[in-house]
Every structure is written in C-alpha cells, then in structure tokens.
Amino acid sequence: MDLVRLVATNLNRRKARVGLTAIGVIIGTAAVVILVSLAIGLQMNANEQLYGIGNLSQINVSPGYGGGGGGGGMMSGPMISADSSSSGEMKMLTNSVIKELQALPNVVSVIPREYLSAQAFVTYKKLMGYSGTFGVATADLTAFGLKADQGTTSLARGTVVIGSQVAMSFSDPNLRPGQEPPAPPDLYDQQLQLTIIKTDLEGNEIRRNISVRVAGVLAETGGESDWSIYLPLDQVTALNEWASGVRVNRNKDGYTEAIVIADSPDHTIEIRDQIIDLGLQAYTMLDFVQGINNFYTILQVVLGGVGAIALLVAAIGIANTMAMSILERTREIGLMKAVGATNRDVLAIFLGEAAGIGLIGGVGGALIGWLAGQGLNVVAIVYLAQQAAQQGGMPPSVAVYTPFWLPVFVLLFSIAIGMISGLYPALRAATMIPVQALKYE
C-alpha cells in the first residue's frame, strides 16, 4: 500500500506530463479495441449468413479416382481406395460403397441423390421455368434438415416438392417488349408439366411430358434447396435412362452423388476425411465456413497489429517521460538510497509509475474503444440493413462486437507495455550510486 500511495503521489505531481503520455496509450488501446471488435463483428455477421446456407452436418460425396488425391470443393487430401488401382481407376458410388459409408462412425444416414441430367424445363399455364431437378432416395426431405413452408416435405410418385425460390424462375416466353412481366405464381398444390428433351440419331428432338402436383414448398434456407425441385430417386433414374437410352446398373455404375449426414457438425470434418481416405470426393459447407473463419482470424491479427503500432509509439513516449523524470529526481533517488532504500525498492517505484501510466491509458482507451464500437455498430447495422433490403438478403444483427476478454486483454497489455517501456529508466535509477546522486545539481 505504501508503494501504491507513493506511485500515485508521484504521478499526481506531474499531471500534465503524465496526461499527455497517457493520451498516446489511450489512442493505441482504443484503436486495438475498435479494430479487433470490427473484425470480430464482421466474422459473427458472416457466420450468421453462412450458417443458413446449408446443413453443416451434411457431406456431399461423389465418385473419385483412387490415388488421385483430393476431395471436392475447397479442400484436398490423399485418396486411397481398396477398390481402385494406382492407375487412377474411378471409384463409383455403388450400393456396396453406400453400405461402406453407412458403416462409418457417427454417420446417421447416407442418401443417394441423382441429378436430372437431360435437358428439361417446367411449365405452369403460360409460364415457363428452369430449375435444378433432383431425385433423392428418401421418402421425406426432413432427412436433409429441410422444412415445409407450405404443404409437406414427403415425396411420392406424381408429386414434387419445390424450393422457396423456384417460382421466381418462371417467366412468360411470349412476353412482348414493354409488357409488364407477370408476378411469380403461387405453385403450391398446382399441376406442373415437366418436359424432358432428347435427340435421336437423326438429330430429331423428342419430348416427354410428365404432369406432377406440387405437394409442398420448402422454407427458405439460402442454399441450393431454394432453387431445386425434388422427386423420388427411381423416377429421376427412369427419366435419365430414357434420355440417354442406357439402363443404369447401380452395382456397377453407382450413383452420381450421395449425401452423408453426420450426427453432429462436430464430426463432419472427421467423417469427410475418412470418406476421402476411401478414394471418394467429399465436400461440406463446413469447409467454406472454416475458411471464412480463418480469414477473419487473420484479419483480427492484422487490424490488432495496426492498433499495436500506436501502442508502440505510446511506449516510446512512456520511456521518454520516465527518463526525464529520473533526471529531475536524481537527488531524490540518492536521498532514498541514503536512508536505506534498496535497488529493488527504487526499481519497484519507477516500474510502478510506468505501469500506472499504462493503467490510466488502458482504462481510458478500453472505455473509449468500447463506446466508439457501440456507436459504429449502430451506424453499420443501419447501413448493412439497407444494403440487405436492396439485395434481398437477411439484415445483420451485429456489425461491431466487443467480447468481454478484449478490454481486459488491452488493459493488461497496456500495463505490460508501460512496465517494459519504463524498465530501462527504472534500472538506471536503481543502479545509481547514492553519493553521486546526492551531489547531482
């Protein structure tokens, strides 16, 4: 307590000098708080948007080349296949491989999926639309984590379940210039005509029309499902066979794709790596999310480093202030040592004063940084909300976020900077010879 009182008294004697030095620390710590909070807020905002674009427990699996190395999408890795030779023979998603995937630990289910590969379009009354059409080997789309906004998610022959944005793809092909385009139709419980086109050997176009009823419209997810049409797998397989003229043997040709569903997003990456080791290609949206998080982590470090430059300048100011203080108090130091103060006592006093300047600047900087972050957050949310409204996206809930640990960290860091800056001047003071110090003018 004596040391604290003495340090406070000494700092109070030179209010102007201490205040000017502390302002440099305030600017540095406030800059660190604001810039890092901005990076954290942007990361949280990005994650809010990204976590809605797909089920992070799902892994998209497609055929791969044994020994070819690498999965699909954004990641890569070694691929070793017991069924594939080193010559690069493709490993297909056959029924036996599907069972192999189902046997992996923490896998809830494996659902084969087939894309309608033929040229096709959908018509409703006078309107025509184009959407990706999938056949899935499940009776209910809730297996993919999808929910119905209208109707049901159950699949049955003669019906389809469509995404929330499928109606937006419909337009009038006979629309004349200057004519107002029709509004997107309400397709729920309506009859659609799916037209598949193929060409024979003579180049003649052959069309096949299928009438289907919209049994359900899915809730918006921001992902692929919003623009997709879902049918039972066997129906899409039959249409692909008709268009290609080749019968599909699942035990030999396999499936185009399979969706592996993990019991938790915590196991998604682990399962994906095991699938790649089997010689297949695998991709999950979690790869993209992790890539984004890595980017924002680097951004936090870079922005924090920019703020730390201001702290470095402040550290030089603290060192200068303490050096000048020692010159002015040389006789005082000699008197303290003459009456029994040890080198350690003198060192503690001057380090305490340097740490006190860091403390004052750290408290002020953390407070100003937090208040500035809150003000910036309000302005940024309003701006981003306007941008989202214009582009049809979801408005952000946060733009600048200051976690509890950040002000605590910058406060401790500023104190440490103060002590490090004052270390050399304090050592000079502690090692002064009392007689010479007392003789100093």
Image (cartoon, rainbow, N blue to C red):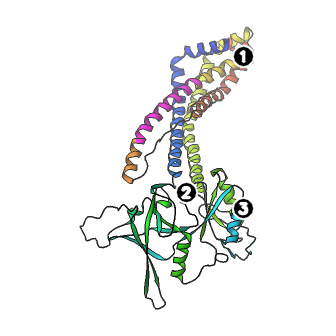
> Within the magenta stretch, is there residue 362?
yes
Relative to 5, residue 235 above or below: below
Q: Earlier in the sequence, mark 1 or mark 2?
A: 2
Q: CA distance from mark 2 to mark 3?
A: 22 Å
Instruction: Look at the image and give the residue range highlighted in magenta.
Output: 359-381
User: Of tags 1 and 2, which is closer to the observer?
Assistant: 2
Q: Residue at x 47, y 82 (%)?
A: 198
Residue assigned mark 1: 345
Q: Residue at x 69, y 59 (%)?
A: 273
Side of 319 relative to 239 (left or right): right
Quarter of the view holding residue 64: bottom right
Residue assigned mark 3: 103
Crowdedness near tag 2: few (<14), some (14–19) or many (≥20) residues, C-alpha within 10 Å: few
Side of 43 relative to 391 (left or right): right
Could you say where residue 152 lies in the image, as x and y percent from the top left? 48, 58
Label 2 sits on a secondary structure element that is helix
Q: CA distance from mark 1 to mark 2?
A: 71 Å
Judge by depth and name the residue closer to the eye, 226 or 426: 226
Label 3 sits on a secondary structure element that is loop
The answer to the question of whether label 2 and label 3 lie on touching residues, with beta carbons closer than 8 A, is no
Q: CA distance from mark 1 to mark 3?
A: 69 Å
Side of 141 relative to 391 (left or right): right
Could you say where residue 333 lies in the image, as x and y percent from the top left? 67, 14
Relative to 160, residue 320 above or below: above
Residue assigned mark 2: 142
